[in-house]
Amino acid sequence: MARFNANDAEKYGNGGGAGYFSLKNDKDTAQVRFLYNGIDDVVGYSVHAVEIDGRTRYVNCPRSYNDPVDTCPLCKDHKFTTAKMFIPLYNIDEDKVQLWERGKRFFSQISSLCGRYAGRTPLCAQVFEIERNGAKGDTNTTYQIYAVGGPDDTQLEDLPEVPDVLGTMVLDKSFEELENYVNTGSFGSEEQAQVKRRTAEPQRRTPATGRSAF
């Protein structure tokens, strides 16, 4: 899994434990604690979107931005990567830990929050209210984050354990499994694979004539 911190965010593409955090309608709000001490705890993930049993899932990309393309079979097969963040939150309103899926641009916003509120106390000591601005389905939806009161003496160990993103929200597959997906459309073995590669794959040429096989 290629993880990256705030300093490396721009080097990556634009391109499931806990449940997802979401605010469904315009002006919906929730009070939360970010499950971080500070900016050093914040990481992003370089992922591929793949289709499994008719569903789109994220799978790890083992390649860092400066690694050769053949480090990852999906990259070598021209599958684009996407930079994602899965922000761990304690949703006070629902009394549960959730992960908030964000793009790499959220690094700027979380960096600002850490700079302002994560000094003498950890970021998790501050309660925030998140407000949605945008109707359901609006691709231009934005979120405002407001501090509620002042920080208290809450520590990370006082809150529920932060879930592991790998293996839940992001599938953690080996090089061989990724290679098998490229060849068969399945992460299973060759014998068990039932899904063929999509018709959108590059055209193949026949050895005899050099013409397209389609």
Image (spheres, rainbow, N blue to C red):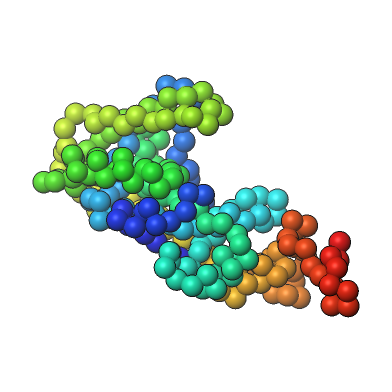
Residue 191 image point, x, y percent? 76, 75
Who is closer to the viewer here, 82 or 87?
82
- Image quadrant in which you'd find residue 96: top left
- Image quadrant in which you'd find residue 150: top left
Q: Residue at x 50, y 64 (%)?
A: 61
Residue 47 image point, x, y percent? 51, 57
Q: Residue at x 70, y 54 (%)?
A: 53
Residue closest to the far left? 120
Q: Is residue 130 among the parts visible in the rendering?
A: yes
Residue 135 image point, x, y percent? 51, 23
- Image quadrant in which you'd find residue 113: top left
Quadrant holding the N terminus: bottom left
Residue 26 image point, x, y percent? 46, 22
Q: Is residue 24 among the parts visible in the rendering?
A: no
Is residue 28 found left or right of 116 in the rendered image? right
Q: Residue at x 81, y 70 (%)?
A: 205
Q: Compared to 205, does 117 lie above or below?
A: above
> How many marks on residues?
0
Who is closer to the viewer here, 157 or 40?
40
Residue closest to the far right? 208
Who is closer to the viewer here, 107 or 169?
107
Is residue 4 found left or right of 203 in the rendered image? left
Quadrant holding the C terminus: bottom right
Q: Compared to 29, does 212 lie above or below?
A: below
